Image (tube, grey):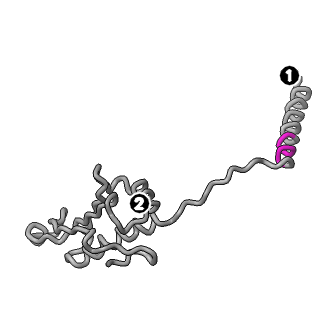
């Protein structure tokens, strides 16, 4: 079991890792050593995820999901497989941490009677100011 968050653990068998070649500069090493990690985690079929966390993860991680609901994380920041593997697991843990947070319920609010009255008073003052300008400059 891999402890992702204080309340969530994932079985290691639910995560598939494959090592691929990194892109970009790096000399001869980048062409022959597969140090980048591609981590796959099946969000839809994972027995470790609570249903509400699963739903939120499916909503927030759309760019990392396939049509089948498999999350793909690619880590290639470091030069070693071990560091990239840990980076990919950290990224997955970060996504799961974000998905565990329940959004706050939005409560509709209404303006108070006093704020409505202030708004109307302000409108009256603005209107009076403009009426006075009309009289002062002879437009009316």
The spot of residue 39 in percent (x, y) is 25, 66
Residue 97 found in image quarter: bottom left
Instruction: Mark 1: give few (<14), some (14-19) or many (20+) Cα within 10 Å.
Output: few
Residue 98, percent across and down? 45, 65
The crowding category of the residue bearing disc 2, from other C-alpha atoms within 10 Å (few below 14, some 14 to 19, many at least 20), is some
Q: Which residue is mark 2?
A: 54
Range of residues picked out in magenta:
115-120
Please tell me which residue is depicted at 33% across the width and 77% down the height of the picture: 2
Q: Is residue 112 above or below residue 23?
A: above
How would you classify the magenta stretch by its main secondary structure?
helix
In-image side of 23 versus 64 (left or right): left
Which residue in the protein does label 1 denote?
A: 139
| Image quarter in which the C terminus is found | top right
Q: Could you tell me which residue is drawn at 25 percent across and 72 percent down?
A: 13
Is 57 left, or right, of 126 in this rendering? left
Q: Quadrant of the N terminus?
A: bottom left
Which numbered marker is on residue 106? Answer: none
User: If you read the primary sequence from the N terminus, does the residue marked by circle 1 or circle 2 appear first?
Assistant: 2
Disc 1 to disc 2, C-alpha distance = 66 Å
Residue depicted at 84% across the width and 38% down the height:
123
Judged from the image, the secondary structure of the residue bearing numbered disc 2 is helix
């Amino acid at each position: 079991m891999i402890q992702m968050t204080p309340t969530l653990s994932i079985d290691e068998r639910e995560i598939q890792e494959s090592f691929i070649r990194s892109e970009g500069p790096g000399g001869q090493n980048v062409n022959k050593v597969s140090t980048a990690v591609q981590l796959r985690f099946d969000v839809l079929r994972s027995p470790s995820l609570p249903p509400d966390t699963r739903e939120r993860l499916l909503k927030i991680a759309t760019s990392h999901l396939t049509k089948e609901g498999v999350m793909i994380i690619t880590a290639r920041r470091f030069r070693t497989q071990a560091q990239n593997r840990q980076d990919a697991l950290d990224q997955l843990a970060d996504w799961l941490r974000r998905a565990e947070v329940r959004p706050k319920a939005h409560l509709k609010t209404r303006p108070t009677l006093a704020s409505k009255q202030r708004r109307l008073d302000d409108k009256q003052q603005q209107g009076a100011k403009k009426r006075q300008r009309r009289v002062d400059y002879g437009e009316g």
